[in-house]
Image: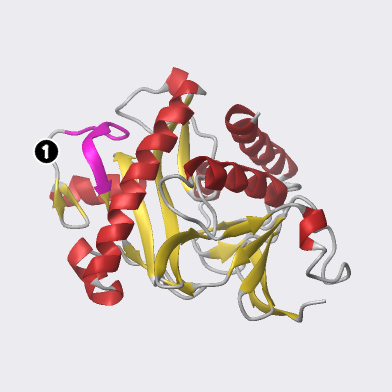
Amino acid sequence: MTDISKVYSGKVRDVYAVGDDKLLIVATDRISCFDFILPTLVPDKGKILTKISVFWFNYLKDIVENHLISADINEIYKVIPRNIAEDLDGRSMLVKKGKRVDIEVIIRGYLSGSAWKEYQKSNSVCGIKLPKGLKESEKLPEIIFTPSTKAPDGEHDINITEQEASKIAGKDVIKIIKEKSVAIYKKASEYASTKGIIIADTKFEYGIVDGKVILIDEIFTPDSSRFWDKEKYAPGKSQENFDKQFVRDYLIAINWNKQPPVPELPKDIVEKTKARYLEVQRRLCE
């Protein structure tokens, strides 16, 4: 049996080293907002995120290689002991270990969230000039690449320009990441559209394995993306969503100051959050 040890516990995922060249990533039912882990769990959230990520990793592997080795628990148990953690089935991925690129990649097809706030002030997003007169949630004239720093847990990521990202990760690496990210966003958006979902924006993480840039972490989940209901889409306002924005909106509505103590989520908010995540899984994966 391969040596295994816990190396990291993030906002949502616990990560174990499996030998020298693999990781076990376990998606928990934790949920985070505004860089804080909420004290309330969302039942089965980790399983939903894992199922969606595995679907996309397979769907998009013709465009960019990814870190997934297997999400089959029987395959995973061939290399790790069964007592390493409880409830691994459905929420675990055995993946290649790589060197993380310390940039968070954000791809935007629509004007929303922090991009909308920045646009209102400057008619630009991360140094990219946009036409005047765009409305909230409007489709952008073209897909834009807006990287941010990868801040330690508890600190805020900072939006940066493509040039600043190149200084951190290297010009050649950023060029590959930008091309691959735009390509997978296009392919995923076209597929999601046939399922009644608009992918307004999303974030990716990349790593380097054997000198090659690959996709890591999660991909096109309700934690990492804005998913809107295509049938109800109407520019000029915030949109009906199937993602974590629902929880953010609740926390804003109760006037939480985004400082400890972090409030519990009421039962109905938890149930409605789970229902939104399950709806994304149903539409995309079934």
Q: Is residue 273 left or right of residue 102?
A: right
Residue 229 picture location, percent across and down = 48, 26
Q: How is the image coloured?
A: secondary structure
Queried whether the magenta region covers residue 31, the answer comes back as: no
Q: Could one spot residue 204 in this view of the protein?
A: yes
User: Magenta stretch?
Assistant: 134-144
Q: Quadrant of the C terminus?
A: top right
Q: Pointer 1: what residue?
A: 131
Q: Quadrant of the N terminus?
A: bottom right
In this picture, is 180 found above or below 153? above
Residue 10 picture location, percent across and down = 60, 69
Q: Is residue 162 left or right of residue 66?
A: left
209 or 270, nearer to the observer? 209
Residue at 74%, 43% in the rendered image: 267
Residue 185 picture location, percent across and down = 38, 42
Residue at 32%, 46% in the rendered image: 182
